[in-house]
């Protein structure tokens, strides 16, 4: 029973940390995007067809369910997938960290880097959510890595806070 409670506690803590980290990552990537050149922004938007990977995922899911989404619905569903992915990643990190405390040695930066490489650079193209990495300007990759580093560090910071008080 005690083990189940500690797993449940890790899941709840991870969800909170993932939500906080998703918010911070969104703020960081927005901040990094704003000063980018119009050319870099246009090249990125052209590469992704003016849709985020999460919006494409929402469209694919709707298609599997036999329905179509309006642009507004696609944006809302894409945002929900974005948040669910971040919260899920926070849970995964909390559980990994619980089972292997050495995971925390990199203060979440190794996790953020791995998350970036696995999701942005590998899985998104493999699942057809984005074109391959070469389609994007370097600024998009730098922003993605920076955002995921912020995600990983924030996740670790929140979990360290929970370690101190709970």
Image (cartoon, rainbow, N blue to C red):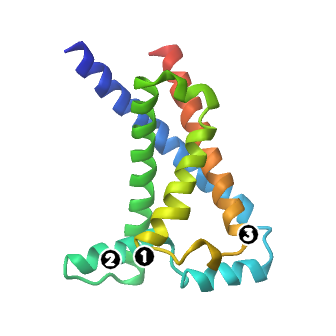
Q: Is residue 90 above or below residue 118?
A: above
Which circle, 1 or 2, is nearer the viewer?
A: 1
Relative horizontal placement of residue 52, taking residue 128 as reference (left or right): right
What element does badge 3 sit on?
A: helix
| Mark 3 → mark 2, Cα distance in angstroms | 27 Å
Neighbour tally class for label 2: few under 14, some 14-19, many 20 plus, Cα within 10 Å: some
Q: Mark 3 or mark 2: name the one nearer the start of the chain.
A: 2
Nearest the viewer among 107 and 51 is 107
Q: Label for residue 60?
A: 2
What element does badge 1 sit on?
A: loop
Q: Label for residue 78?
A: none
Q: Which residue is mark 3?
A: 138
Dividing the picture into quadrants, the one containing residue 77 is: bottom left
- What residue is shown at x 59% (from left), y 82% (from top)? 47
- What residue is shown at x 64% (from left), y 45% (from top)? 150
- Where's residue 101, x and y in %? 49, 22
- Where's residue 125, x and y in %? 48, 71
Q: Which residue is mark 1?
A: 128
- What residue is shown at x 63% (from left), y 59% (from top)? 144
What element does badge 2 sit on?
A: helix
Dividing the picture into quadrants, the one containing residue 92 is: top left
Labels 1 & 2 near each other (Cβ < 8 A): yes
- What residue is shown at x 44% (from left), y 45% (from top)? 89
């Amino acid at each position: 029973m005690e083990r189940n409670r500690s797993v449940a506690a890790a899941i709840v803590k991870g969800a909170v940390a993932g939500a906080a980290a998703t918010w911070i990552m969104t703020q960081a990537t927005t901040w990094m995007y704003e000063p980018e050149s119009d050319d870099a922004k246009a090249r990125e938007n052209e590469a992704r067809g003016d849709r985020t990977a999460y919006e494409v995922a929402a469209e694919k899911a709707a298609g599997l369910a036999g329905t179509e989404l309006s642009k507004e619905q696609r944006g809302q569903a894409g945002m929900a997938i974005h948040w669910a992915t971040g919260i899920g990643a926070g849970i995964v990190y909390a559980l990994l960290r619980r089972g292997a405390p050495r995971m925390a040695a990199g203060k979440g930066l190794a996790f953020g880097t791995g998350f970036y490489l696995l999701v942005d650079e590998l899985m998104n193209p493999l699942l057809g959510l984005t074109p391959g990495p070469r389609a994007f300007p370097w600024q998009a990759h730098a922003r993605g890595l920076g955002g995921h580093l912020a995600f990983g560090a924030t996740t670790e910071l929140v979990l360290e806070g929970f370690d101190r008080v709970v």
